[in-house]
Image (cartoon, helix red, strand yellow):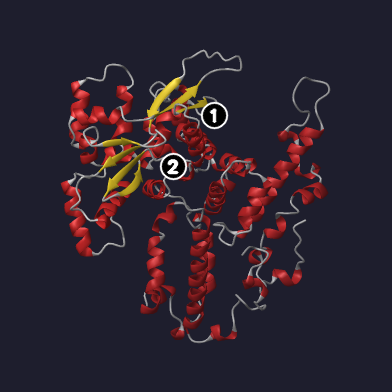
């Protein structure tokens, strides 16, 4: 794909779009474009046009373009119009494939997949459940969080200390449950889904077993309730009642579940001298969940378990600010990115100066975008691919005419996102007419313009593209002239004033060198078709 590799120009003759001798026949043989669209053979195409209704608001076709296109096809035959529609449908199909390719990125695992992998691979397991003399390695936090039976009877069950002293063995007394059904129950506890290998009858039987042992897909309320239990006063009846109504469990179970966490995440504010101006921020969490979601945190937890140390993970606050702690932990526990979970006192006030300036200028507030970029880098550092994808989606949702240039520059840097970069280029292709008529055009990098013009789907006329490229080149030339000629007399920045420079004073050779990589991407043949009479009398050269 691309302007240089366009097959429509290479394989076409001199009459590829011009009128032919068959177009001089009787008007009775000619059909209108509307009748062809309404025909049964093109219902598929009309459906695709209907799905593009929202794009009409993005770019309105000018009256001159409509008039030129109407004059071009006014005397075409039905066969020629059908060929045009076939070409358009083919181009539409290719464009859909391009959009799918732009959406492609490495797949990530969900919370259920990570927990299942941690159970099957025995990652950071801290207990064994014995059923019919078979030991099943498991995580006590997950069992107690998603099965009321294990939570209520954990202390009363027969507990045997293991040989290493770090794990416990819990005897499951219900031998009337088959081994296959017991493993299916554990599968559901970890994933919240039925095992795909079960038959319909086994699923119905498993449902009865799950109801008997009160296994629920209940796991993440810990994080929602945890902020109000950071202080020593955890006996608020209103808070406990709110959680009880939300999750359907009694307060004793809630307290038992809260104090079952085994890890502490510490955001250290210490400087090089070892002293911090603020106290370290501590947050209780489950080491099993952290190890299941992050390879980096897993290595730290496994190293501390092997050394017999306390599961206290200390991260410098410059790498992991405390303001994002609740957002990131919420994403680890729920696979959802929620900026409302930001620590109190760190949110940007709605009445702040930045918000007022954004409202006055008609622009959107960029605080969520800044937070998404920061959390994206933290997710990459902690090896949290699912959270990184959620941040990329949040960043892409904030792409606008004002932010597309800065986001493309950020995505192109080391540690950036190729997914965001592709979406910035796609946005530039779609909104090229709006961008070329604004000051944002002069903020675009040459590589960004080149990536855009390489596509066959720039939503702009070739004449407008040529004018835009020349204006961008002239602005770049003036900028280079300003850098070369500083003012040696006054204390101003430059001796050249943009308003004082005339086009005749610009160096054509230097301008041609600046646009050397962009002008070949402009389809001059689309501006002057081969059958145009001017092409026989003029030898058009851009420079």
Instruction: Residue 463 in the image: state x and y as whole percent.
Output: 63, 58
Q: Mark 1 points at which residue?
A: 319
Secondary structure of the residue carrying numbered label 2: helix
Quadrant for the C terminus, please: bottom right
Q: Which of 468 and 54 is in front in this view?
A: 54
Q: How far apart are marks 2 and 1 (CA)?
A: 19 Å
Q: Give me the residue at 19% from left, 32% from top.
A: 244
Other-residue count near label 2 (Cα within 10 Å), few / some / many at <14 / 14–19 / ≥20? many
Q: Which mark is residue 162?
A: none
Q: Give me the residue at 62% from left, 72% from top.
A: 8
Secondary structure of the residue carrying numbered label 1: loop
The quarter of the picture where residue 236 lies is top left
Q: Answer left or right for 37 relative to 412.
A: left
Other-residue count near label 1 (Cα within 10 Å), few / some / many at <14 / 14–19 / ≥20? some
Tell me which numbered mark, 2 or 1, is placed earlier along the sequence. Answer: 2
Instruction: Residue 356 in the image: state x and y as whole percent.
Output: 44, 26
Q: Mark 2 points at which residue?
A: 293
Instruction: Residue 224 in the image: state x and y as whole percent.
Output: 31, 32
């Amino acid at each position: 794909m691309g302007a240089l590799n366009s097959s429509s120009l290479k394989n076409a003759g001199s009459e590829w779009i011009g009128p032919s001798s068959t177009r001089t026949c009787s008007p009775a043989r000619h059909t209108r474009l509307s009748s062809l669209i309404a025909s049964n053979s093109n219902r598929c195409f009309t459906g695709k046009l209907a799905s593009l209704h929202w794009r009409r608001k993005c770019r309105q076709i000018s009256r001159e373009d409509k008039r030129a296109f109407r004059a071009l096809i006014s005397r075409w035959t039905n066969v020629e119009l059908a060929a045009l529609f076939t070409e358009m449908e083919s181009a539409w199909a290719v464009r859909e494939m391009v959009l799918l390719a732009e959406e492609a990125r490495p797949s990530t695992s969900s919370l259920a997949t990570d927990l299942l992998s941690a159970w099957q691979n025995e990652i950071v397991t801290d207990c064994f459940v014995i059923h019919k003399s078979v030991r099943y390695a498991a995580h006590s936090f997950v069992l107690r969080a998603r099965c009321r039976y294990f939570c209520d009877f954990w202390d009363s069950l027969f507990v045997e200390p293991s040989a290493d002293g770090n794990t416990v063995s819990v005897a499951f007394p219900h031998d009337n449950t088959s081994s296959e059904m017991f493993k299916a129950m554990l599968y559901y506890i970890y994933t919240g889904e039925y095992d795909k290998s079960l038959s319909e009858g086994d699923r119905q039987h498993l449902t009865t077993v799950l109801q008997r042992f009160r296994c629920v897909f209940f796991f993440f309320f810990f994080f929602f309730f945890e902020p109000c239990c950071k202080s020593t006063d955890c006996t608020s009846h209103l808070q406990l009642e709110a959680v009880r109504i939300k999750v359907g469990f009694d307060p004793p179970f809630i307290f038992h579940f809260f104090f079952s966490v085994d890890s502490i995440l510490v955001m250290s504010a210490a400087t090089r001298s070892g002293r911090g101006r603020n106290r370290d921020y501590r947050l209780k969490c489950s080491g099993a969940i952290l190890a299941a979601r992050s390879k980096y945190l897993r290595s730290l937890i496994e190293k501390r378990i092997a050394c017999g140390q306390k599961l206290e993970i200390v991260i410098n606050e410059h790498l992991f600010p405390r303001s994002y702690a609740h957002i990131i932990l919420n994403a680890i526990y729920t696979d959802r990115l929620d900026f409302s979970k930001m620590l109190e006192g760190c949110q940007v006030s709605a009445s702040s100066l930045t918000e007022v300036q954004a409202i006055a200028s008609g622009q959107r507030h960029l605080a969520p975008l800044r937070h998404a970029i920061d959390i994206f880098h933290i997710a990459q550092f902690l090896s949290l691919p699912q959270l990184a994808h959620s941040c990329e989606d949040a960043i892409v949702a904030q792409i606008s005419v004002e932010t597309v240039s800065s986001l493309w520059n950020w995505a192109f840097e080391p540690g950036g996102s190729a997914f965001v970069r592709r979406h910035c280029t796609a946005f530039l292709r779609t909104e090229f007419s709006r961008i070329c008529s604004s000051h944002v055009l002069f903020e675009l990098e040459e590589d960004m313009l080149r990536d855009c013009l390489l596509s066959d789907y720039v939503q702009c006329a070739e004449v407008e593209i040529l004018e835009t490229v020349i204006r961008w080149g002239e602005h770049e030339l003036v900028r280079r002239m300003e850098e070369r000629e500083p003012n040696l007399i006054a204390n101003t920045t430059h001796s050249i004033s943009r308003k004082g420079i005339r086009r005749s004073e610009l160096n054509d050779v230097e301008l041609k060198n600046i646009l050397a990589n962009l002008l070949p991407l402009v389809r001059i043949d689309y501006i002057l078709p081969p059958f145009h009479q001017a092409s026989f009398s003029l030898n058009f050269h851009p420079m």
